[in-house]
Amino acid sequence: MKIRRHPVMSFFAGAFFGFGIMLILFTMGFIPMTVQWLGIGTLGFAVLGTLVAYAIPPSNKKKAVPATP
């Protein structure tokens, strides 16, 4: 059975999550409003999402149903 991972999907999920977190931090005033901070944070979370995709064990969605006794 081939192990299936989704690094591209997790890259974009991390990028969107990072973009949202950076916007919240901008709005609350925790970091200065510059494009560099937005890019660094978004790219950082995107890379983190990709690394998590390779670190966690893959789920096996096709589990066998146990036979009834």
Image: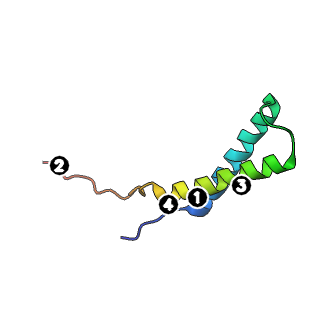
Q: CA distance from mark 1 to mark 3?
A: 11 Å
Question: In the rendered view, does 45 fall on the left or right side of 30?
Answer: left
Residue bearing mark 3: 43
Question: What numbered label is drawn on residue 7?
Answer: none
Specify few, some or many for label 2: CA neighbours under 10 Å numbering under 14, 14-19, or 20 or more. few
Whichever of labels 1 and 3 marks the residue nearer the N terminus, that label is 3
Q: CA distance from mark 4 to mark 2?
A: 36 Å
The x and y percentages for residue 69 are 12, 48
Quadrant location of the N terminus? bottom left
Secondary structure under the numbered disc 4 in the rendered image: helix
Instruction: Give the colour scheme shown.
Output: rainbow
Residue bearing mark 2: 68
Q: CA distance from mark 4 to mark 3?
A: 17 Å
Residue drawn at x 49%, y 60% is: 54
Q: CA distance from mark 2 to mark 1?
A: 40 Å
Q: CA distance from mark 2 to mark 3?
A: 50 Å
Question: In the rendered view, does 27 fall on the left or right side of 52?
Answer: right
Q: Amino acid at mark 4?
A: Tyr
Q: Amino acid at mark 3?
A: Leu
Q: Amino acid at mark 1?
A: Thr
Whichever of labels 4 and 2 marks the residue nearer the N terminus, that label is 4
Q: Which residue is more in the foreground, 59 or 46?
A: 46
Whichever of labels 4 and 3 marks the residue nearer the N terminus, that label is 3
Residue drawn at x 78%, y 52% is: 39
Question: What numbered label is drawn on residue 50?
Answer: 1
| Marks 1 and 4 close (CB-CB < 8 Å) | yes
Whichever of labels 2 and 1 marks the residue nearer the N terminus, that label is 1
Whichever of labels 2 and 3 marks the residue nearer the N terminus, that label is 3
Residue bearing mark 4: 54
Above or below 41: residue 60: below
Q: CA distance from mark 1 to mark 4?
A: 7 Å
The extreme top residue here reads: 28
